[in-house]
Amino acid sequence: MSLHPKIIDLTLDRMVRLLTTLGSPENNIAPVIHIAGTNGKGSTNAMIRAGLEASGEKVHAYTSPHLARFHERIRLAGQLIDEKLLADTLEDCEQANGGIPITYFEITTCAAFLAFSRVKADHTILEVGLGGRLDATNVIAQPALTVITPVSVDHQQYLGETLAEIAGEKAGILKRNTVCIVGAQQDEALEVIEKQAARVGARLFTYGQHWHVWVEAGRLIFQDETGLVDLPKPALLGAHQVQNAGIAIAALRALGKSEEDCAKAMTDVHWPARMQVLCQGPLKDAAPNAEIWLDGGHNEAAGKAISGLLNELPAKPTHLVVGMLNTKDVSGYLAHFLQGTQTMQAVSIPGEAATLSAAETAKAAKALGFNVSEADDVLTAVQKIAQIDGNARILICGSLYLAGNILRENA
């Protein structure tokens, strides 16, 4: 962290310099599936990986941020990187860097590429950290496949104020003669993606044009130019996961995988802090008869998706515990939960310099009309809700960083 004063500083110059010093390990890894977008990158990553592994492949995967442990970011041939290899790889990168300024995300991404180059696999799934065009992962000259999940407004301070500007950054991963699976997009975003594809010579395989996905009679139906497949619904809950599942299936079919592999992608997928039910730990002990859900979504589109899932569940008094970063649109996120929520407890995120204080979050919620109060921490918030209604539905939400804190203690 001392190597660069900024947490985020988007450029590829430092990455190219260090990777060159390391011998260009990014050129010696298994064929890459590169995923950008605003929402659904992690879930789509996990479904693609489940399908590839079902076909017998060994798969590297890179994702961020981590929840409970840094090791979650780097998966080598199906297994999380072990402590010794992680330490050795980071040390190799630090020595090669020679103390020159480089961000935390950049040097750890270099470490991922170095680790991937040292372990054999059949595919590598790379999830963009932020944006795409200048993201540290965007150093792969010719990926096997690219993916753009739905784009919405987020990280405006880095990616631009308008949806078109943000879509332009995401479309920066498009490469000549490489197919890109494109999820459902607003017209403004899709227009930018299509223009960039024409500019660089990428081939788009777009939702609503080349493929469709929907739920019918409790099954997931996917259709593209080669036919229709009838699959189980994804194990990940929520209507928004149907779109993520469609993207994953389109990607797997583009890679030549079978209908059986696509079915396994739906049933075998696991991705924590995406409407995850907590069944053990101090929070469950504090409210043993309550439903306790955890989700790390943090922008307006995520708020809409999560509240939609809550509305699909059997009716039950619902209470929120919310902690968010000061870089997020708190009001835009929370507005979707106003209807159907009994109370809200606002908390700060432990150990995060960029956290909104509980008081700031509560102020924003109160302005929207929530019945809100502040709590010192999540455990206190859950205890307060349990005193009001021991059988309540409790949703802890607002940030992946908050979710990580919860999982370290309750998973």
Image: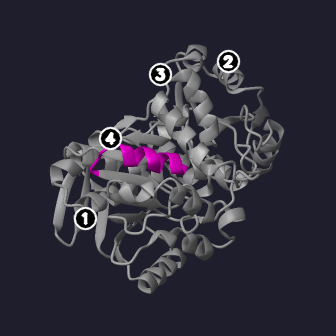
Q: Which mark is residue 387?
A: 2
Task: Based on the picture, tell me whether residue 114 belongs to the magenta stretch.
Answer: yes
> Which is the main secondary structure of the residues drawn in magenta?
helix
Name which of mark 4 and mark 1 comes first in the sequence: 4
Corner quadrant of residue 362:
top right
- From which residue to which does the magenta span run? 109-122
Q: In the image, is 231 to the left or to the right of 306? A: left
| Kind of element beneath mark 2 | helix
Q: Amino acid at mark 2?
A: Gln
Q: Is residue 119 above or below residue 24?
A: above
Task: Based on the picture, tell me whether residue 137 belongs to the magenta stretch.
Answer: no
Q: How is the image coloured?
A: one colour
- Viewer-nearest of discs 4 and 3: 4
Q: Kindly report the distance in space between the C-alpha atoms of the residues bearing marks 3 and 2.
A: 19 Å
Name which of mark 1 and mark 3 comes first in the sequence: 1
Q: Which mark is residue 254?
A: 1
Name which of mark 2 and mark 1 comes first in the sequence: 1
Quickly name the residue at label 4. Answer: 77
| Kind of element beneath mark 1 | helix
Q: In the image, is 129 to the left or to the right of 255? A: right
